[in-house]
Image (cartoon, grey):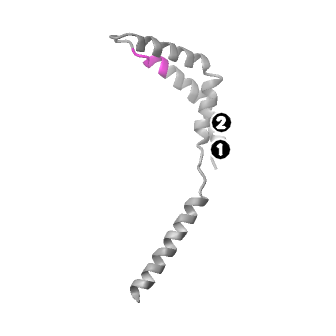
Amino acid sequence: MATEVAEKIIAKISLKAEEEEEEEEDLVDPAATLKEECAETKCASYKARLDECNERVLSKAKTSETCFEEILDFYHCVDHCAAPKIFQHVK
């Protein structure tokens, strides 16, 4: 008797969990979307410099060159562009 009750309770719990999973929709981080937009528009020149550096480094077999400065410039531009817009989406 007790096992039957336990089985029914477990079945109801698992059904509710499945319903909740189906109802949840994928959340999209607005910060990621805004940063992508900034990277493609206002920071396109920094992205181009980063891509050029990356191609140059990958084309060499042995090099001590890194694209650290270009990466910092690019991320600084993206963050600076997106920051004022991100907080408009905070509830």
In depth, the one of 51 and 77 nearer the eye is: 51
The amino acid pointed to by label 2 is: Lys
Which residue position holds label 2? 85
The three-letter code of the residue at mark 1 reads: His
Provide the residue span drawn in magenta.
66-71
Name the residue nearer the viewer: 71 or 87. Answer: 71
Horizontal and vertical percent position of residue 79: 56, 30
Left or right of residue 69, residue 78 in this image = right
Residue 69 counted in the magenta span: yes
* Residues tagged 2 and 1 counted as in contact (Cβ below 8 A): yes
Q: Of residues 83 and 75, which is closer to you in this image?
A: 75
The image position of residue 1, as x and y in percent, is 41, 89
Mark 2 and mark 1: span between their CA atoms? 8 Å
- Rendered residue at 52%/26% (across/down): 75
Callout 2: SS? helix
- Magenta stretch containing residue 91, yes or no? no
Quick one: SS at disc 1?
A: helix
In the image, is residue 34 above or below residue 25? above
Q: Disc number at residue 46?
A: none
- Residue 83 position in % (x across, y down): 60, 34
Q: According to the image, label 1 marks what residue?
A: 89
* Structural crowding at the residue carrying mark 1, measured as other residues with C-alpha within 10 Å and reported as few (<14), some (14–19) or many (≥20): few
Towards the viewer: 42 or 27 = 27
Q: Position of residue 29 (x, y in %)?
A: 58, 43
Please report the residue visible at 63 percent of the width from the left and 46 percent of the height from the top. Answer: 90
- The correct choice, above or below, for 34 with respect to 76 in the image is below
Q: Compared to 62, does 86 lie above or below?
A: below
- Secondary structure mostly seen in the magenta stretch: helix
